[in-house]
Image (cartoon, coloured by chain):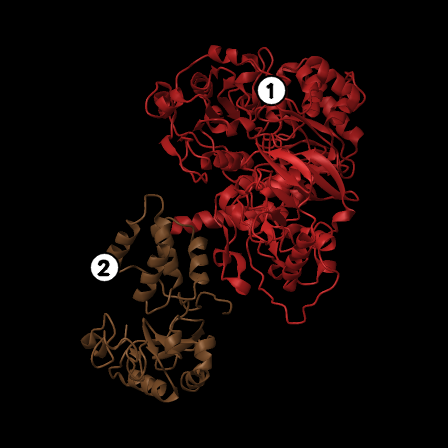
Chain colours: A red, B brown
Amino acid sequence: MARIIVDGIEVDVPPEYTLLQACEEAGKEIPRFCYHERLSVAGNCRMCLVEVKGGPPKPTASCAMSVRDLRPGPNGEPPVVLTNSPMVKKAREGVMEFLLINHPLDCPICDQGGECDLQDQAMAFGLDRSRYHESKRAVENKYIGALVKTEMTRCIHCTRCVRFTAEVCGTSDMGAIGRGEDMEITTYLEKAMTSELQGNVTDLCPVGALLPKPQNFRARPWEYNKTPGVDVMDALGSAIRIDTRGREVMRILPRLNEAVNEEWISDKSRQIVDGLKTQRLDRPYVRENGKLRPASWTQAFTAIAAKVKAAAPEKIGFIGGDLSSVEDLFAAKALAESLGVKNIDGRQDGVKLDPARGRASYLFNATIEGVDRADALLIVGSNPRWEAPVLNARIRRRWRHGDFPIGVIGENLDLTYSYTHLGSGPDALAKVAQGEGFGEILAKAERPLILVGQGALAREDGAAILALAAKLGGPKGDWTGLSILHTAAARVGALDIGFVPGEGGLDAAAMAKAGALDVAFLVGADEINVELGAFVVYVGSHGDRGAHRADVILPGAAYTEKTGTYVNTEGRVQISDRAAFPPGDAREDWAIFRALSATLGKALPFDSLTQLRAKIYEAYPWLARVDAIATSDPISLASLPSGTLGHGALVSPISDFFLTNPIARASRVMGECSALAHGRVTAQAAE
Amino acid sequence: MSVRRLAEKQPESFEFTPENRAWLDAQIAKYPPGRQASAVIPALWQAQKQHDYWLPQKAIEKVADLLGMPYIRVLEIATFYTMFNLEPVGKYFIQLCGTTPCMLRGSDDLIRICEERIGEQRHVTADGLFSWLEVECLGACCNAPMVQINDDYFEDLDAANFTRLLDDLAAGRPVHIGPQNGRLRSEPLGGLTALTDFYGADGKSGPLSDMQAALQPANPAK
């Protein structure tokens, strides 16, 4: 530890701390534009100048000077840093004046106004008038993709976006061309950015130069109601803030959660917003003579009751969706049980994970934070860049720190870090499990991470692959390497509450077969095609595949419109708050099942969310511990039944990152992103 | 300086000649593995020399591919350094120094001549022979005013000898590189006045001088 005196306050900080960090440790706020905790130090905005006693007689950029580089006083006194001396005040005023020379005075029409670092810091540290009479420079706006709008005259060249795309995204999309007054931030020849995390540059931008394009001129920051939520676009459960104005969800921003998403979210999580407003199911529908007709709740329930009463319990089935909350699935399961139905399944893709084999067999046991500590990584049948972009950024960061061998079994894709491609089929995994090649590296590693994707598990030999991977990622001290990366936000919750076939029940694929069921309930399940024959009841929020197939549609709430519990891929229980209300007659899904149960004469034993949650917590006590990961028992991994490995390449289930769920498919913005991404692929193929 | 963009009309492709490619490989080999990007400036420079003294988009991409760099990183470098021309230049590309010592010694006259003879900066004459650009100090202040034409310095200029120089270039006559007023490098115009005991009896040959080489006419054509 090094001792340093900041404005008379003595603090002990690690010697590698920068002065800026040391000042923050002492409780002093240092203004900054270019400095960002998660990016490399650029030191080019000069806003963080401080006075260092004993150093050179000029202000020092505190973000770029480390504590250990300061000399002690003549008698060994700790170095002294001043953050509020006249020199510092003057320096800040000067820097601010320079920054504002070319910054337009368009705060009144700028979307950043109200949450603008430059605006705030100009108020706090700047002069109250301008001495600049010459003409300001103007910069042409750049096209950099479907998600980010540019207003480049406002740019102050902090290069946060450049560093972010180069370091965190790993795509090096952005750069600064020219120099001096002619420096301009742009992508290469104004091509669209290619990262799945590009939306984050709008949060990083300290001014209004990079703004979220879909939210252009929609609202002012102070008009929003801000609700903490949990993202359901992937299974990470990223912390989000849902901003609403009136009844409308206006935008989604990341919330800080060091254990999961740090401060990033993927573009799908961020810009799904317009999908929440289109293709919405806002009233019940009943199919009559082949056509869906708007109906009342009573009519819909009566139609369902008639069919359910006529059907034997073995001919009724429930399929859980990918975006459902634990409450929804629990209510559906409770209804199924009250009807004596055993055909329930929350695994639309037929993934071979079974809660009966212990919680450790389906969790990301290493935890997301554990990626930082892992010392070797094997990716099996997954494309983390699309299945969980934020996790992929974490893997990339770990890789950048070095000494991190990565092997991939499956598709040979650009994951933004370099890896050894070990093969595409299960045979490659078998070789590794025998300790050949990459297996040696894994055996030597203290904390090997075996990342198993749904592409490896949603196949006939999924259980055998899981057993092999569990052998590689078995417990080593307090480290369990086997880490299942789910793609569906609802999946771990569904497995936790046992939303899987009961004794003799059919699984999702069997239920979807023609003639298997008389009545099929789709709880927001849109990724499965129920063949003709069954009477399909769709409970969900969007008019997508499930609703098209449905005979009765019961309109449900989307994830922003209900308080729901979600369990992320590492088993972390999180609760998302309601930010808006469902449109029209739509209701929260659990309430629909509760109401339907009354019509069916099997009233479920809960009338409120509190009562429902009490039931859930009673049955599954670990779900009551919000924001915690219940310890699982990794010993059970050894008992996973092995089987024969099949053939064929392991392929990630996600073929289009931007269109993985009904909300995304309803979003125009996601459609545009998807088209851009496809255009890139075809352009590359043509070359 | 002003905003620099890639030229609107671009060639379809760019490929290094085998000799240049071999030269570039030798440059790349100077750096440790994984640090090939260090060779980006020599690579761009060679590409520019090969391509009539300007860098097309395809050359930037070629260099990026060769060195394993993202395209934007190479574009940053190409737009940062003014020595990389992003648009076609004349066969004789005149970089005219207008910084203080040259200005005091009459670079304004040279600028006027350029404007009259060639036109605006960056404009290439119809015959494709000349284009010019005012640049910052080229480090030959003791021979001010001066211009750089392609790779060579032409110094101690005035309106008369600069016009003559341009005439000679246009006509394809051989020209003398270096001071145009009879000076040898930056030695005094009238001959040495000090240390004459040590250096040449003619008073005009300082150390390292090789009269033969210095008086050799040379053609700066690329």
Crowd class of label 2 (few under 14; some 14 to 19; many from 20; radius 10 Å)? few
Query: Which dot marks residue B147?
Result: none
Disc 2 target residue: B19
Residue toward you, A17 or A156: A17
Q: Chain of mark 1?
A: A
Disc 1 element: helix
> Measured from the top left, where is residue A52 in percent x and y?
61, 47
Three-letter amino acid code at disc 2?
Glu
Disc 2 element: helix
Residue toward you, B48 or B163: B163
Q: Residue furthest left?
A: B212
> Measured from the top left, where is residue A272 in percent x and y?
64, 42
Between label 2 and label 1, give the one nearer the viewer.
2
Disc 1 target residue: A495
> Measured from the top left, where is residue A5 in percent x and y?
64, 39
Q: Is residue A38 left or right of residue B118?
A: right
- Residue A666 visible? The answer is no
Q: Is residue A572 left or right of residue A674?
A: right
Q: Residue furthest bottom?
A: B160
At horizontal 48% and vertical 66% (from top left) the residue drawn is B4
> Measured from the top left, where is residue A619 in percent x and y?
69, 13
Crowd class of label 1 (few under 14; some 14 to 19; many from 20; radius 10 Å)? many
Q: Chain of mark 2?
A: B
Q: Is residue A345 left or right of residue B4?
A: right
